[in-house]
């Protein structure tokens, strides 16, 4: 199957600095791709190139077989069949909810348009708010309208630019679920830009990790979480403790013992192992050299700060069994870990 | 529960003074009504329905419509080019767009007359007033357009390929309320203008009122026409208030949208805009200086010095009193939530919206009837100027006073300071720089004032503005030139420089 959205060697240079460097990726029809990276790595620029708000310096973008951007071709935003949901929603402040949602449907006769708007109002749980102005809505409702407006014309691709970032946790979870449901129902190909790893991991079919204007890893959420391409990705995807070590006899020798590597390693390599907080096993041991110095209770689990002779590590322990502050421990690592050799 | 209000000698003084301002700013209007009510109703009706009044209405309304339409069109195009589009020499073009603020309309009229003899009637009045008022629209529209959010612009682009529809989605909603408010401001300006239309011999209400006042002993006609202008102005003020109320607070920090690419790289726009200023403000400017160099200004030096001294003297004294009263009113309203202070403020805004000539007219009635001892004295002129420019003073000091967070007052009290101690030790040091800047601006604006000074000044006393007006009216351009140059150099350019550094929204008050 050929890719539905195909981005090849995209380059953007602004004011002498390279914003996007040779970015290539593809998305299948109906797939949900997240572009994940910290702020300032060029995610938004990439999205703006896809939407047609910026023209890349080189490279091409193809949507459903149409080249929409290349050295020789340029399709303006409105003709790309792309819907966009910006971070701030960007509702037309002078239009009611219903008119906002219908803003992209002006070519439609009024009866089917009203029907389509009503349908989206219902899916996005905006009943009763049709005649309100954006200023009279909560932040979450505004984002709902923005999503509905982008999806109403049934675009080929929907671009989401951190649309949930400004909302508080509860609203965010609820809205994410509703949006995911709607996108699945309409089987719209979606590209989400986000710096929130939980969001990317939980929503996406696949993830592209971005750093310094380049994509450094793509894969399914499970892949990426289990096998980060390098130590920085590992740290970005979730908390991890970095332990220096070297490879001997196929094992990674560290201060916490010999660990089994997940990835392929060579004897004699020196580098770092990344251990996730949930991979630590804290064994109470009165003669142990590690001591519990902090404890954050979250109900379902507890984050325990442990000071070992070498460093301070954060480990996840299940609620009732978590050790108390001041307890002496021996720290073990369970399960295989990722090891990243230092290039030298 | 109600918040505790600070008490003390200061608060009594502040309240007493703000109560005293209320009659000061409302008497002129009330007195004009009384004056007209004394006239035989039959006469009033005859005057109102006379063909002459009809002609004045037609003249005034057509000038107002033409100037407003021109100023809106030019000002919005300028603002759009400067704020949203990519044009060459953006900063220079921006500065050029505001240059006319430095030239009072009657100085511009003088400049044109100096180059084009017989520059009289509708078209000249339209041109001079359009150039003078376009910066008001430009500044408000720029401020509004600067709030255009990139993301909204993006969404519009992804929704529609038609630029007209995108403007309807993004640009128009952004500037709509500022178009209404600045349009009404321009209309008020045109109705109020006296200097330019009188020099350019175009009969609007203000010119007719002045002629009626000058040419007969019975001033009833002037009063009747004055009241008509008051009613016209009130209608516009009510509309203006409604337009302001609809103004939406802009988003705080928006990412600027991409610059719109214009045909020819924006050069045609930049050139046309530069031409507009070059013709509109450049011709009078050059003319003023050319006459000043050509004329024999040396012989007149003593008169020039005397009128400069008078102008500056009126400016300094009236601005000082106005700023002091402005502080009193703002403090009474902000800190004590004292209703009479709010009444005084609203009333003074109303007076400010009226043509200065009409305010001056009612002051003459009051002077002659109620306080003949004060009439035609310096004190009376200063009093009139204070009433006229109180809103300028209020809007100049208000931001400075608001810079003191209300929590500081409570904090100071908890530290055991008395309100008066707190004012001198906490409030004053914070507000002083802002107050001085505001005061200086009010001085400069008052120096440019023409109609009120013209009507109320003591016999034989001349200011720069009145001399310029008289000499130009008599066709002595060389004799008028030194006054024009001094006015522009003394009041125009500094006021323009100061106001450019201020919040664009506030500038409309100042001009």
Image (cartoon, coloured by chain):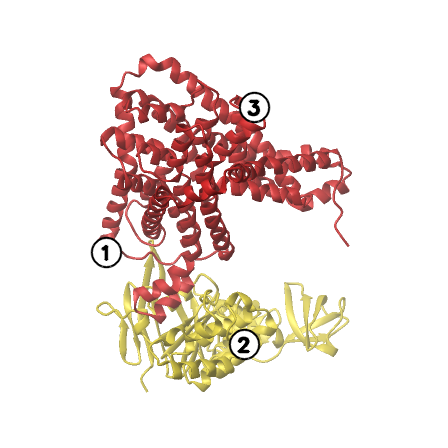
Disc on the earlier residue, 3 or 1: 1
Q: Residue A98 location, x and y as percent?
A: 46, 75
The colour of chain B is: red
As measured in the structure, the alpha-carbon distance from the residue carrying label 3 to the one carrying label 1 is 65 Å
Q: Chain of mark 3?
A: B
Q: Chain of mark 2?
A: A
Disc 3 element:
loop
Would you identify the image quadrant in which residue B401 lies?
Answer: top right
As measured in the structure, the alpha-carbon distance from the residue carrying label 3 to the one carrying label 2 is 75 Å
In the depicted view, which residue is nearer to us: B311 or B55? B55
Q: Is residue B482 above or below residue B27?
A: above
Q: Which residue is mark 3?
A: B372
Instruction: Kindly check if marks 3 and 1 are in contact, taking CB atoms under 8 A apart as contact.
Output: no
Disc 2 element:
helix
Check residue A333 in the rendering and tell me which mark sits there, or answer none.
Answer: none
* Res. B6 visible in picture: yes
Would you identify the image quadrant in which residue A1 lies?
Answer: bottom left
Q: Is residue A341 above or below residue B174?
A: below
Supply the letter of whichever chain is yellow. A
As measured in the structure, the alpha-carbon distance from the residue carrying label 2 to the one carrying label 1 is 43 Å
Residue at 47%, 54% in the rendered image: B243
In the depicted view, which residue is nearer to us: A161 or B238? B238
Q: Along the horizontal axis of the image, is B329 left or right of B42?
A: right
Do tags 3 and 2 sit on the same chain? no
Check residue A175 in the rendering and tell me which mark sits there, or answer none.
Answer: 2
Q: Chain of mark 1?
A: B
Which tag is nearer the camera, tag 3 or tag 2? 3
Q: Residue B59 location, x and y as percent?
A: 33, 44
Q: Which residue is mark 1?
A: B263
Q: Residue B367 location, x and y as percent?
A: 54, 27
Residue at 70%, 72% in the rendered image: A330
């Amino acid at each position: 199957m050929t890719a539905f959205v195909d981005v090849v060697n995209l380059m953007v240079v602004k004011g002498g600095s390279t914003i996007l460097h040779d970015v290539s990726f593809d998305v299948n029809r109906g797939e949900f791709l997240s572009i994940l990276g910290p702020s300032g790595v060029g995610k938004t620029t990439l999205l703006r190139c896809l939407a047609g708000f910026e023209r890349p310096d080189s490279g091409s973008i193809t949507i459903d077989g149409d080249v929409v951007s290349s050295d020789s071709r340029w399709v303006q935003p409105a003709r790309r069949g792309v819907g966009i949901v910006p971070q701030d929603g960007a509702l037309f402040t002078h239009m009611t909810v219903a008119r906002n949602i219908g803003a992209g449907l002006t070519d439609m006769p009024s009866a089917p348009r009203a029907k389509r708007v009503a349908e989206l109002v219902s899916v996005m749980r905006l009943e009763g708010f049709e005649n309100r102005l954006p200023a009279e809505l909560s932040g979450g409702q505004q984002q709902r309208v923005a999503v509905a407006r982008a999806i109403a014309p049934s675009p080929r691709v929907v671009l989401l630019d951190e649309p949930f970032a400004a909302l508080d946790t509860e609203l965010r979870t609820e809205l994410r679920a509703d949006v995911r449901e709607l996108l699945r129902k309409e089987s719209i190909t979606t590209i989400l830009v986000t710096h929130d790893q939980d969001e990317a991991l939980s929503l996406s079919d696949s993830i592209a990790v971005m750093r310094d204007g380049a994509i450094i890893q793509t894969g399914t959420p499970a892949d990426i979480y289990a096998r980060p391409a390098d130590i920085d990705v590992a740290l970005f995807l979730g908390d991890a403790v970095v332990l220096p070590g070297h490879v001997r006899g196929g094992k990674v020798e560290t201060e916490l013992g010999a660990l089994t590597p997940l990835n392929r390693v060579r004897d004699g390599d020196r580098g770092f192992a990344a251990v996730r907080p949930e991979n630590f096993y804290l064994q109470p041991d009165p003669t142990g050299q590690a001591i519990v110095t902090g404890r954050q209770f979250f109900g379902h689990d507890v984050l325990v700060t442990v000071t070992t002779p070498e460093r301070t590590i954060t480990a996840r322990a299940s609620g009732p069994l978590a050790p108390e502050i001041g307890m002496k421990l021996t720290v073990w690592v369970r399960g295989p870990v990722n090891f990243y050799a230092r290039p030298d | 529960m109600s918040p505790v209000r600070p008490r003390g000698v200061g608060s009594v003084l502040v309240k007493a003074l703000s109560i005293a301002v209320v009659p000061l700013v409302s008497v002129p209007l009330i007195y004009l009504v009384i004056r007209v009510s004394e006239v035989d109703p039959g006469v009033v009706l005859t005057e109102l329905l006379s063909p002459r009044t009809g002609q004045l209405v037609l003249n005034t309304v057509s000038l107002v419509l033409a100037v407003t339409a021109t100023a809106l069109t030019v000002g919005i195009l300028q603002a759009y080019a400067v704020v949203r589009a990519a044009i060459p020499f953006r900063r220079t073009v921006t500065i050029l767009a505001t240059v006319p603020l430095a030239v009072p309309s009657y100085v511009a009229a003088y400049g044109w007359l100096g180059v084009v003899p017989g520059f009289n009637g509708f078209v000249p009045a339209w041109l001079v007033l359009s150039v003078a008022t376009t910066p008001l629209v430009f500044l408000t529209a720029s401020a509004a357009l600067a709030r255009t959010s990139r993301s909204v612009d993006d969404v519009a682009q992804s929704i529609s390929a038609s630029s007209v529809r995108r403007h309807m989605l993004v640009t128009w909603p952004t500037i709509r309320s500022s178009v209404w408010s600045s349009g009404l401001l321009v209309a008020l300006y045109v109705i109020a203008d006296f200097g330019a239309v009188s020099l350019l011999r175009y009969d609007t209400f203000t010119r007719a009122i002045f002629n009626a006042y000058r040419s007969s002993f019975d001033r009833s006609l002037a009063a009747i026409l004055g009241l008509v202008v008051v009613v016209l102005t009130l209608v516009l003020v009510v509309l203006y208030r409604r337009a302001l109320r609809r103004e939406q607070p802009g988003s705080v920090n928006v990412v600027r949208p991409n610059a719109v690419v214009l045909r020819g790289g924006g050069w045609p726009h930049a050139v046309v805009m530069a031409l507009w200023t070059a013709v509109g403000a450049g011709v009078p400017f050059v003319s003023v200086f050319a006459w000043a160099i050509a004329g024999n200004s040396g012989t007149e030096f003593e008169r020039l010095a005397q009128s400069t001294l008078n102008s500056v003297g009126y400016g300094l004294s009236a601005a000082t009193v106005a700023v002091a009263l402005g502080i009193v009113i703002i403090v009474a309203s902000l800190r004590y939530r004292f209703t009479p202070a709010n009444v005084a403020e609203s009333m003074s805004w109303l007076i400010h919206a009226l043509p200065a000539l009409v305010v001056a007219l009612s002051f003459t009635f009051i002077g002659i009837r109620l306080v003949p001892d004060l009439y035609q004295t310096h004190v009376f002129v200063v009093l009139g100027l204070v009433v006229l420019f109180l809103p300028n003073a209020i809007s100049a000091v208000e931001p400075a006073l608001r810079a003191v967070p209300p929590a500081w007052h409570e904090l100071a009290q908890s530290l055991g300071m008395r309100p008066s101690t707190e004012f001198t030790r906490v409030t004053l040091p914070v507000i002083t720089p802002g107050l001085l800047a505001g005061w200086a601006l009010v001085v400069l604006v008052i120096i440019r004032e023409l109609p009120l000074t013209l009507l109320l000044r003591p016999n034989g006393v001349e200011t720069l503005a009145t001399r310029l007006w008289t000499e130009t009216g008599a066709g002595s351009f060389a004799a008028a030139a030194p006054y024009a140059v001094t006015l522009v150099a003394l009041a125009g350019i500094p006021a323009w420089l100061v106001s450019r550094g201020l919040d664009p929204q506030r500038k409309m008050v100042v001009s």
